[in-house]
Structure formats: C-alpha cells, structure tokens
Amino acid sequence: MSDEPLVTIRGLTKRYRRRAAASSAPVEALAGVDLTIERGRVLALVGESGSGKSTLARCLVRLEEPTSGEIHYEGTEVCSLRGEALRAFRERVQLLFQDSAAALSPRLTASEIVSEPLEILGRGDAAQRRRRALELMETVGLSSAEADRRPLDLSGGQRQRLAIARALALKPRLLILDEAFAGLDASIQAQVAAVLQDLRRREGLTYLCISHDLALMSVFADEVAILFEGRIVERAEAARLFAAPAHFHTRALVAAVLSVPPLAEATATS
Amino acid sequence: MKLPRKLALAASALAGVHFAALAAGFLAPYGPTEQSRAWPYAPPTRLHFFDEEGHVHLRPFVYPLADDETRAGGYREDRSQRFPIRFLVRSPATLGGPGEGWRLFGVDEPARVFLLGTDGFGRDQLSRLLHGARISLFAGLLATGISLGLGWVLGTVAGFYGRWTDTLLMRAADVFLALPWLYLLFAVRAVLPLHLSADQAFLMLVLVIGLVDWARPARLVRGLVLSARERNYVLAARGFGASDLYLVRRHIAPQTFGVLLTQAALLVPQYILAEVTLSFLGLGVAEPVPSWGNMLAALQRYHVLSSYWWMWAPGLALVPVFLSYSALSEALHSRVGPASP
Amino acid sequence: MARLARRALHGLFVLFGVSVLSFVLVELAPGDFYAEMRLDPRISEATVRALRARHGLDRPLPERYLRWVASLARGELGYSFAYGTPVAPLLWPRLRNTLLLTGTATAAAWALAIPIGVWWASARGPAVRRSLSVLMATLLAIPDILLALALLLLAVRTGWFPAGGMTSVGYEQLSRAARFRDVVSHLVLPASALVLCVLPALTRHVRASMASTLEAPFVQAARGHGIPEWRVVFGHALPAAANPLVSLFGLSVATLTSMSLLVEIVMSWPGLGPLLLEAILARDFHLVLGLVLASTVLLLAGNVLADVLLLAADPRIRAEET
C-alpha cells in the first residue's frame, strides 16, 4: 500500500447565512479544517452536535460546496470536478447517512434500493442489476428473502446493512459513515461494526467514521480526530487519546464516557 | 367498512352521469336546438300505464298536447289518442338536431315526449340537459387537468430549484391569490372577445378557468417538493450522481400524486360551477348551444322562476354531481392525507 | 406591530403586482372601447383617431400605465368610457354596498358557525352529530347560484322580502329609521344566500378544531376540577381552538367576496358585481380594472383584519412581538 494519504483536506471552511435571524453574522460550520485520511485505515471524527462533522462529510462527497479550502483525493482536487470526472469520483467515495429509515426510499423494495446507483448510472439491464443487488445483500449478511421487502418492514440493523450494501454498489474505495451507529441498540451496533470490519479487511476499504460516541470510536477506529468548533484540535491513535488527552475538549469528552471496557469486550467478540 | 361503499357509489354515479353526457346523442329523444314552436313552456309529459277504460298497457304511452282554452298558455292532455313509447327509434335528420341516427326512445308524430318539459322556444329540456352536461361537466374536468398540470409543473420547479426561482414564483402566486377568484376569472374573460362560436367558447372557458387558478396547486406541490427534496434518500441518490430529472421522476413526483388526486376531487365541482356561472351571465357558451349555465339563465325572469318548475332541472342536476364529488374527495382524503398543508 | 407593518407592506407590494397584472391583461385585449365605433361607417377614421389620442390610447404601454397610476394618485382610477366619468366616483358607492353585504354575511356566518360547530363537536348523542353531518354535506352540495335563485323564488312567491335591489322606490322620502329598515329588508336575502353557501365549510372547520381541542389534557383537567361543561367549552376550549379558525377567517373573507359577485348580480344588489358585468359587456376596460382592484383591496383588508384578530386572540403570537 502506498504511503500517500488517500485524502488530504486543507483549510476547509464553510459558512452559512442564517435566514430567520435578524443578525447578519454568518454561522461558521467549518473554520479551516486540516485533515488527512490514511489508506486502508479507520479514522474516526468525533465531535459534539453542531461541531461541523456532517458538513465536512457532505463537502467531501460534493453534496455541499465549501466556502473555501481544498480537498484532494489521490492527488486530484475534488471541489472543482465536473461532469464525467465528478461522476467517476462519486464512485470512489460514498456517504452513509445517519438515519437509515430516512436514507432509504419507503416506496422501493430492498433490491431496488441496493441497485439504484447502478440504475442511475445505467449499468447493466434489470436482470443484471438484480443479480448484483442480491450479491451485495449477501455481502452484508442479508438473505435474498428480504429482497422484495420494503425498508419499513425491516429491522434497524437490517436497514443499516441495506444502506451499506447500496453504498458498496459502485465499488468505492472510501466510505464515510455519518453516525452509522447512532440510534441502534448495543447488540445491533456490534453486528453492524462486525460487518463493516469484515468488509474493510476483504475489500481493502478506507473508512472515515463520524460520530459523537467517543467510547465506541475508541474500539472501532484506528485513529481518532477531535472536531471542536469547526477545527481539528487533536488527533491520535485511539488508545493514546484515551490515556493522555491533550486538548481540553478531548479531556472533557473522555471524562464524559462512563465506562469503556464493557463496550470493548462486546465488540471484540465479533 | 362504510368508506369503500360510499366511494364506489359516488364513483359509479359520476361515471353514469358522464357516460350519459357522452351518449347524449343516443339517449336524448330530440336535438338540443330542435324547436317545437307550438309548445313553449310545456310541462313534463306524463307517462301512463293505465288508459281511460282502466286497461293496463305494458308499454307506457303518452297523450298528445293540446292547448287549454281555459288558461292562457296552458296545456291539457288530448285523451282521444294514445301514442306508445317506441324504443330504439331511427330518427331522421332534423333542423338543429344531431343528425340522422338511432335514439333510445321516442314517439310518433304529432305527439311529443317532453320528459322534462320545454323552454320558451319549445325545446326539449331533457335533451338539452343531456347535451349541456357535455359542456358543463367536461369543462370542469378539462380545466382541472390544466390547473393541476400547470400548478404541478410550477410548484415542482419552485420547490426543487428553490431560492430565486422559488421566490419569483411564490410572489407571482401571491399576486394571483390576492384577487378574489371569481373576479380574476371575470377580468380575464373581459379581455377576450365577447362573441365566440360554441367550440371557441368551450376552449376559452377551459383555458381561462384552468390557467387562472394555478397558484393554489402550485403552493401545495411546492411544499411537498421542498420537504421531499431534503430527504436523505434523495441526497443519497444525488450522491450517486443522479440527475435532477431522475430525482424528480423517481423520488419526488410520486409523493405529489396522492395530494393532486384529492385536489382534483375538490376542484372539478368548483370549475363546473365556474362554467355554469359564466354561461349563466352570458360570458360563456352562448345560445343556442345548451350548457347548464345558459339554460339556468332563463330563470332570471320572474315568471319563469316561479311558474315553470321543470326549468330548474339544470340547477338541481348539479346537486347529485356535487354530492358525488364531495364523497369522492372525502374518501380520497382519508386514504391519502390532507389536501391542504 | 412589526409583523403587522410587514404584512401591510407585503399587501402594498401585492396590490402593485395586481395592478400591473391587470393592466397588462387589459392591454392584451384585442381592440379597445373605440373598436365598435370604428365599425360604424358614419364616424370617420379621423374622429376615432382623435378620440383615441385625446384619451391617450395611442401611447406606448409603460406610459399608459404611468398615466393610469397618476390618475390613481389623483383619486380618479382612470376614465370610464361607457359612463363618461372618471372611474372612482362610480366605484365608491358600489364598494360600500359590497362591503355592507359581505361584512354582514361574514359576521352572520361566523356568528352561526361557532355555536353550531361547538355544539356539533361537543354533542354527546350520535344522532345530533349524524344529522348535522348530513345537513352540512347536503348544503355544501347546493351551488351558490341555485341557492340565490331559490331565495329569489321565495321572495317572489311569498312577498316576505323584496325580490332584489337595495332600496325600494321612494326611499328618499322615508325617515331615517324607515330607511334603515328598508335596507335591512333588502339585505336579508342576499346575505342569507352568502351565509348558507359558506356555512357548511365553516362549521366543519370549527367542529374539527373544537373536537381536537376538547380531547386535550388541559380540558380534561378543567372538567376534573368540576367546572361546568359550558364554561369548559366556551371559556377554556374555544380560545385554544381559535388559532386555526382565525386563519380561516381570512379565507372566508376571500370566498365570500368571490361569491358575492354572483349573488349581487342575481339579486340585483348594487355592488361591485353588477357593475363589473356591465363593464365587461361594454368593454369598458378601465372600469373593469378599477373594479378588480377594488375587490382586491377588500380581500387584502380582510386579511389584515384576520391578522389583527390573530394577534389579539393568540397570546403566543403576542409574546413573539414583544
């Protein structure tokens, strides 16, 4: 594996103008973020609500445009991509949304959802797409019996896995998981974490895992970066971060975690 | 469950009425402009099964009309002759009639079967009611199609693209909605030529009624599109590189269809009434072509209003139509959700 | 008050938009008032041209619009060719009469809708609810034109009410009190037509709003405290249910104004409606314009009134302001 980081972010800034408020002072969601994502590893981005995590994720996949700054993916500048190049980039980097129920169209069946990216890009005919959808579902541990069911008939864990299957349809290299574990029961979290780890090993994927749950990230991720008020304030290997947090905000987050060991045991078994 | 039965009843009533309108040429015994000058304001012809001697006839018959010498303008039945109702009559081309063809029923000359009486020109009201239904009912339907179609397009564009497009369209909608609807309709009608042929008038009515009322459906659709646009699965599809057209077609538009249907059930009766109102005042379809509106115009004269009850038929016919649409909209409402945000 | 000011500004903007829209609309009309005259061989082309020039009909569109706005500022609202006078003096009495009719109808409709709706929502026995439901559904299905004609028939047949018009012959000779009674007797039928048309929709909404409020915990609590039912309903539930109803008020004004157009014509009530019909038939476009604007002003005024009521009724909105 090459030593070059997969993604390099420099000085990323995003400002919003709030509509309703009388004051014209804009909100700065990101205030100059510098971050690198190493190939084949899991980087966790931890911060509280409003710290700008989701904004960063969206900028990375071009769902939002940053106010200023640069994002490089494998050396190519991402923010200026258009047309065919943008489409190609979109196949490389995929975003997994937080609320799986909201991220899946209630009108479509499971196999239609998973094959939608292929449909959008016009890859293969209906039969080929369905075959691929079933393959992908198998990869995440969903049986073909679920193929014709609708998202609302599936459990939370199954929905999340379905979303993962969809994200894999275009064979991405980088997966951004936006609060992939939020709202799931602990046992389901373990299930999803297991699927993700397995996939990473087999396909050689890279993960950027966005979360507010520092405890969970400490066992799931290799490295943890802390996002505070739109800036990266600390970054270290997970264990070291817990042992010796440098920044005051990191210290506060660590202190807020009630108990780490039991969670580590639960996920270690899968 | 009461709901589906009510829905089925309403739907079949509407289907029946519309079919009758389309089959007017066959169902009506006379042409819509066919005049029987000898019999102005004749009351509805009575069907008899029993004759003077008390014998029963399986086939109903009518007595021909004769003038009643005791009352000016009155009629009595001439009991000296019986004319049985004939079914599946082949009718010759008559002046002002729909031409040669088959009719469901009729009677031989010189008797007449005016089941709903005649108007001041001796024209059979039942025939005019059936032919007029074509204009009134279908004007409402077509205008609804135009209004919802235009409203849907503009609402989707406003909701999907947002910002300037949205602001511009919604401000325009504000302006259109600031005018009382009927006044706006009249204003637009005012600028068009007064005297139009029947075809032109029908087209004009449909276009004017439909185009003027785009603002309310547009607002409704815009709201739905705005919320649908932000759903994560739409964003996800965008993340896969979906084009705007794909997103609208696959994810956003289907959300709007239910509401459009409910709106349709509310708008059609309103637009039928608009046609009736305009024609009633002489601004719609003009004589001699019948529409329920211009037929009602005869009631503006007091002696017609109070003496000839059968002339109310077009107005009374509106009631079951409206009831059916009302039941339809209620049924749709409970299945689909509220029609107003 | 900032909210009201914003709404008023919005209203002015809308009025401006309406004026432009109407003016452009009228300009699209093929032919103008003098088109008929042109067909008459006795009147020379030169005369028609001179007449048009005198009234500025041959100027470019923006200039015509500005001239019209200027006449608006002068209080004239353009020139009516059919009547040969500025539009404004024709409008005011008509506007007043329409306001009288719609105002009375609105007040009467709400005065009836609230008690009926409350009764409907709080009635214990299903019989009452069923019969009201059927009654309102039937009434809703009767078009306004039929209602107006039916009431006219009532007048013609029974003579209890005058069959149309606003005043009787010899009105000027009557005393103050007699004049008032005369107008009221003429007002009853057209106002009733309007009220009957709009009542089903209003009572339904009142019922719906009250029904959901009556289930609310604070109402149950009030009952539990032993407060008499009528007090609970009118003192506690109704004010809470008022918010959506006040928005409905604005809508009811819009519907009534629109309906009044037809009712006025059918019952010969001398409001904006009959004049509009005349203006259309005479192709007197400035008059049409003026009338359409007048009706819009009525509607906007009704909306502002609805806003004021909302401000007065809902303490949450008042708090937002302070």
Image (cartoon, coloured by chain):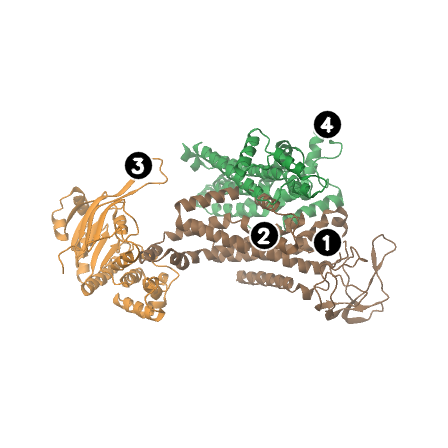
Chain colours: A orange, B brown, C green
Say whether residue A259 is visible.
Answer: no
Looking at the figure, which quarter contains the C terminus of chain A? Answer: bottom left
How far apart are the two marked residues, 3 and 4, measured between alpha carbons? 68 Å
- Classed neighbour count for the residue bearing mark 2: other residues with Cα under 10 Å, few (<14), some (14–19), many (≥20): many
How far apart are the two marked residues, 2 and 4, measured between alpha carbons? 45 Å
**On the image, numbered disc 2 is attached to which residue?**
B271
Chain to which the residue tagged by mark 3 belongs? A
- Classed neighbour count for the residue bearing mark 4: other residues with Cα under 10 Å, few (<14), some (14–19), many (≥20): few
Tags 1 and 2 in contact by the CB under 8 Å rule?
no
How far apart are the two marked residues, 1 and 3, measured between alpha carbons? 70 Å
The answer as to whether the residues below labels 3 and 4 share one chain is no
Instruction: Using the image, determine if residue B110 lies above or below residue A75.
Output: below
Callout 2: SS: helix
Say whether residue A64 is visible.
Answer: yes
Task: Indicate which disc residue B311 carries.
Answer: 1
How far apart are the two marked residues, 4 and 1, measured between alpha carbons? 41 Å
Residue at 77% across / 62% down in the picture? B46
